[in-house]
Image (cartoon, coloured by chain):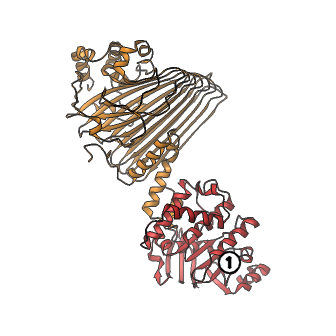
Chain colours: A orange, B red
Amino acid sequence: MIEQQYIDLFKQYRSELDANSAEGLNRHRDAAFDIFTQIGFPSSKQEEYKHSNIMRCFDKDLGLNLRNIPIPVNPYDAFKCDVPNLSTYTCFLINDRYYNKAEQAENLPSGVFVGSLLQFAKEYPAQFGTYYAQIADMRDNGIVAYNTMFAQDGFVVYVPKNVEVEKPLQLINILRGGVDLNVNRRILIIVEENAHVKLLVCDHAVDDVHFVVTQVTEISAAASAQVDFYELEENSEKVTRLSNLFSEQKENSNVVTSGITLHNGYTRNNYRFRLLGEYAEAHAGGLAICDKTQHIDNFAFLDHAVPNCMSNELFKNVLKDKATGIFCGKILVEKDAQKTQAYQTNRNLVSSNTAQMFSKPQLEIYADDVKCSHGLTTGQLDEDALFYMRARGIDKEEARLLLMVAFTRDVVDMIRIPTLQERLITLIDKRFRGELMRCGNCEVCK
Amino acid sequence: MLKIKNLHAIVEEQEILKGIDLEVNAGEVHAVMGPNGSGKSTLASVLAGNPKFEVTRGSILFKGKELLEMETEDRAREGIFLSFQYPVEIPGVSMVNFMRAAVNEQRKYRNEDPISATDFLKLMRDKRELLGMDSQLVSRSVNEGFSGGEKKKNEIFQMAMINPLLSILDETDSGLDIDALRVVAAGVNKLQTRENATILITHYQRLLEYIKPDFVHVLYAGKIIRSGGPELALELEKKGYDWLIR
């Protein structure tokens, strides 16, 4: 059993785990451990993991830095992020640990906390206790349980009532290690009533070893809150990213998420959005550009629990070589959720015979007065458009490129930070031109 | 400028062009007329290099070079322009980026530097005004959400931007109301010089009231069955095609 070594490790190092974390996190380990020993990692025998063999990712000799041995790194030297100057407030997680020497150009509005999860657990025990491990449901999710067993630190954004954080925040996740590593990180976003915040999270692997990363993100959007949560993955092919994002929204809140997979190894992104207050809106975007043997699996579950909410999902994949893409979109409209509007679109461009795309829309609707739709297409570039462009003198390859960038455009348009949109268009263009075959700026890729 | 000799072309194993001969010189305007299904649009597509059509016999010399050996984009760079009967919508590609790419590819082919931003914007403005196009249209995605008339205007706008040697206008008049037809025809006439040439493909005389052809050809069942001066178009308008076919 692959799980056994992790079960043993947990038992053996439990005191170190606790000693290098905080009571608020430690409190959840036993329950997580019980669940994990029962259900283990997801297996590809489960319908929802049919095309992603998660178990296999853990069947390696992976180290865990449970004693918090400092990893010598200066994030400013290690690399330059591909999205520079976006934010005046940039933070770093080195593996799962918050880097507390970051220099900030500006102060945050008063009452806002942006920083280490560990520190937050100690300084804001009430808020921490209300949200941490409360939004993320681990009962049927072995990865979340596993993460909760081992998580020791992470990143927090806490925005109190009526506070608007105008400029976007940025978190840069840096993976560093001399040996193959398992990293378990947490992100907690608490946005109180009528508060606004925008966050961009960039993922970069710096060293050329295998990383298996679990990330659990919890977003709580209170009434009339606005939350933008954007993720940009630029990892090496040796990185496995297992992300689980849970978002809960109260009335009139508005949450926009977007997961852009520019370069990766093996990625599974789970999204679980719950609309719990009337007139809440959730917009979820996803875009992956994969080639070689890269693997992208996006699983989105959208739960309309109350009436008058709106959700919109747009997931797109561009696949070539032997890349694999999977999309599963599940929409649940509960019995009382009348006047629901739920839209889901999945479009895929597959440009080689060896690339594979699996797509599964699932709509479960128990209310009778709703507007729901889903659209799914998988195909190749429009030959008529290609000819039209070539007939204007545009080179065939250039025309393909323009069309591929155009294909990604509506996902980029969902992002509510104009400078990030512009930067992404440039990065996507570079990616298609093969100028971003690796993440580009880190030490490995130089 | 253009010499078509014994051109045969097939699409989906069906022969559409069955031996076309046509010569077009600089400064000339040729009208190619004919009933539906006679091969007019196939001829336009073959000249532009549409890969859906396969040429089985014949040759097309353009400025002395064999067109059939050239890729679509190289034909365009040599100076061939096709105004599409059904312009394609390209969501996500802005008119500005599309035109900049097209103009610069042409310049690159002639070993010229890319056009400067200010020159490009001026060129866009001048040509837009020539066609009386709304500035909103050029800031949108290529043909996306354009009306039928706007799409046709946009074709002639692109022609003005690129300034080709040989323009092939495939049913440019179809879908245009009379006012739009006047504007489009005036645009085409302004672009006509002694150095360039135009092939008008149409099955109505209507367009020829605004753009005067020097030669009129009747295409029927894949062959040119009659050629003449502008008076041939008038005759066709009166008598239809039946008298020629019988």
Farthest right residue in view:
B238
Residue at image x 79%, y 80%? B238
Q: Nearer the viewer, residue A412 or B60?
A: A412
Going by the image, does B129 lie left or right of A330? right
Q: Would you identify the image quadrant in which residue A34 lies?
A: top left
Q: Would you identify the image quadrant in which residue A46 lies?
A: top left
- Amino acid type of disc 1? Met
Residue at image x 44%, y 63%? A396
Image x and y of residue B105, in percent: 46, 67
Chain letter, disc 1 residue: B
A408 to B219, vertically: above or below: above
A180 to B188, vertically: above or below: above
Image x and y of residue A389, in percent: 51, 63
Q: What is the quadrant of the N terminus of chain A in the image? A: top left
Residue at image x 56%, y 23%? A194
Q: Nearer the viewer, residue A408 or B94?
A: B94
Q: Crowdedness of circle 1 by 10 Å Cα count: few (<14), some, many (20+)?
A: many
Q: How many marks?
A: 1
A251 to B187, vertically: above or below: above
Going by the image, does A218 lie left or right of B18? left
Residue at image x 24%, y 39%? A207
Which residue does the numbered mark 1 point to in the structure image? Answer: B33
Q: Give the structural element (helix, strand or loop) at label 1.
A: strand
Q: Is residue A51 visible?
A: yes
Going by the image, does A7 lie left or right of B168? left
